[in-house]
Amino acid sequence: MDKDISKILEGWDYLPHEITVRKITGIDGKEKIQMRLELGLLQMEIEGRPDCKKPYGKESLLEYYLSLIEEHKAKYRTDEKFALDHNDCLKLYVESLQYYYRYLCLFKLGEYEGVIRDTERNLQVFNLIKKYATDEEDIRAFEQYRPYLILMNIRARAHYCLERKDYDEALKNIENGISSIENFFKEYQRADLIKKSEEITFLKKWKEEIQQNKPLTELEKLQKELKEATAREDYERCAELRDRIQKLQGKNKKGRKISPPSRQQNNKL
């Protein structure tokens, strides 16, 4: 078998300032993700652990450690004294890097549901480390990346909503993201970093752009027309518009919002 990957890379150049990614069909007939690197490529599974391994028979190390916690609870009726040492944290860190590379690729491909899935998964790891790690250095090693991870989760959620033209839900997600990152800095008594945060700055700017460019809803159009009718003292038209607004608001209360998919609720988002 020819093991030289030159033919695979032929015509697919490495671009140092952007993520270069593509989908291929593997010999097993399943879609794979390939990420171009300077000296070759990474190939990842789209579902499950990116390298397709099943540590300890579980989908991932995260699932393995969660099962250990459940065993501990079953034995002692509490999770007190359950702990993750430095080696445990290092293993989870290395595994989380796989999901990091995959969600970057999925974001580039515009597959936002996968980004939401993988960023939520890594946030779950961060929460696990924060609660059970015995070494503060291990906690800090993860926590320093939490604002960025929240940012990517929120970007994926907002894009998911924007694709479905649910601008209000997109804005709501962005506002939640800003609050989550602000709370992160406050929790660590570093509120002074809020104004310097690149993640918060990006989300605030994006929020303004969406607000400026989003088309008016039927309700907003009626409210704008009502304001204009009031200004010109067209009271008959005002009464008609108020009736239409009330009816529309009644319908909206019964409507359902389009929300991005989530495998589980995360206490940070």
Image (cartoon, helix red, strand yellow):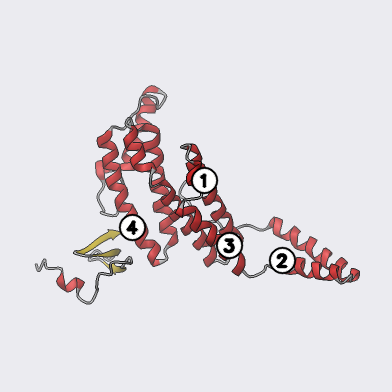
Q: Amino acid at mark 1?
A: Glu
Q: Position of residue 52 (x, y in %)?
A: 26, 53
Q: Is residue 54 visible?
A: yes
Task: Determine the residue located farthest toward the bottom in the rendered image.
Answer: 11
Sequence-first tag of 4 and 3: 4
Sequence-first tag of 2 and 4: 4
What residue sits right under mark 1 in the picture?
A: 182
Q: Is residue 267 visible?
A: no
Residue 220 versus residue 198: which sits nearer the camera?
198
Residue 127 versus residue 258: which sits nearer the camera?
127
Q: Give the number of the disc on residue 220.
A: 2
From the image, state whether disc 2 or disc 4 is nearer to you: 2
Sequence-first tag of 4 and 1: 4
Q: Position of residue 258 (x, y in %)?
A: 57, 59
Q: Quadrant of the N terminus?
A: bottom left
Q: Quadrant of residue 26?
A: bottom left
From the image, state whether disc 2 or disc 1 is nearer to you: 1
What residue sits right under mark 4 in the picture?
A: 102
Q: Amino acid at mark 2?
A: Glu
Sequence-first tag of 3 and 2: 3
Question: Residue at position x 53%, y 61% from top?
Answer: 205
Q: Amino acid at mark 4?
A: Arg
Q: Is 195 positioned to the left or the right of 99 in the image?
A: right
What residue sits right under mark 3 in the picture?
A: 208
Rounded to the nearest angstrom, the CA distance separating label 3 from label 2 is 17 Å
Q: Give the number of the disc on residue 269.
A: none
